[in-house]
Amino acid sequence: MGKGDRKTAKGKRYNASYGNARPHSVSRAAVGAAAPVARKTVAKAPAKKAVAKKTVAKAG
């Protein structure tokens, strides 16, 4: 866990980015406890794989 780890605050500082480990906004206590928004989840069907046809070698 160091500079290259983008999931830690130290890694966020090194990479000059913001996220859950390094929030850019004011804390929730100062803003007020807002209810979290529920996200819609869409279940994706597994990708269908094409079955390769076997060829029979001709004798002769």
Image: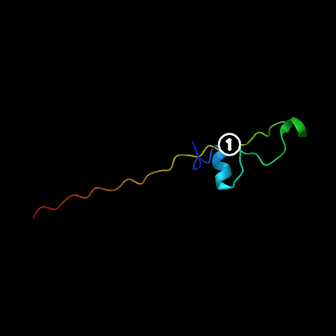
Which quadrant would residue 36 be assigned to in this image? top right
Q: Which colour scheme is used?
A: rainbow
Q: In x, y percent, where is residue 16?
A: 69, 55
Q: Is mark 1 on a helix, strand or loop?
A: loop
- Which residue does the image show at 38% across and 53% down from the upper left? 51
The quarter of the picture where the N terminus appears is: top right
In-front residue for pair 42/50: 42
Within the image, what quadrant is residue 15 found in?
A: bottom right
Nearer to me, 11 or 7: 11
For mark 1, does the 10 Å Cα neighbourhood hold few (<14), some (14 to 19), or many (20 or more) residues?
A: few
Which residue is most to the left? 60
Q: Mark 1 points at which residue?
A: 41
Residue at x 89%, y 40% (from the top left corner): 31
Q: Is residue 15 above or below residue 39?
A: below
Left or right: 46 with respect to 50?
A: right
**In front here: 32 or 38?**
32
What type is the residue that disc 1 sits on? Answer: Thr
Tell me where residue 37 sits by quadrant: top right
Q: At which x and y percent is residue 3? A: 59, 49
Q: Residue at x 72, y 45 (%)?
A: 22
- As drawn, which residue projects farthest toward the bottom? 60
In this rendered view, identify the residue nearer to me: 28 or 3.
3
Q: Residue 19 at x, y = what percent?
A: 71, 47
Total marks in image: 1
Q: Is residue 50 above or below residue 21?
A: below
Tell me: 38 left or right of 47.
Answer: right
The quadrant the C terminus occupies is bottom left
| Residue 14 in the image, given as x and y percentages of width and height | 64, 53
- Write the residue at 64% across / 43% down: 8
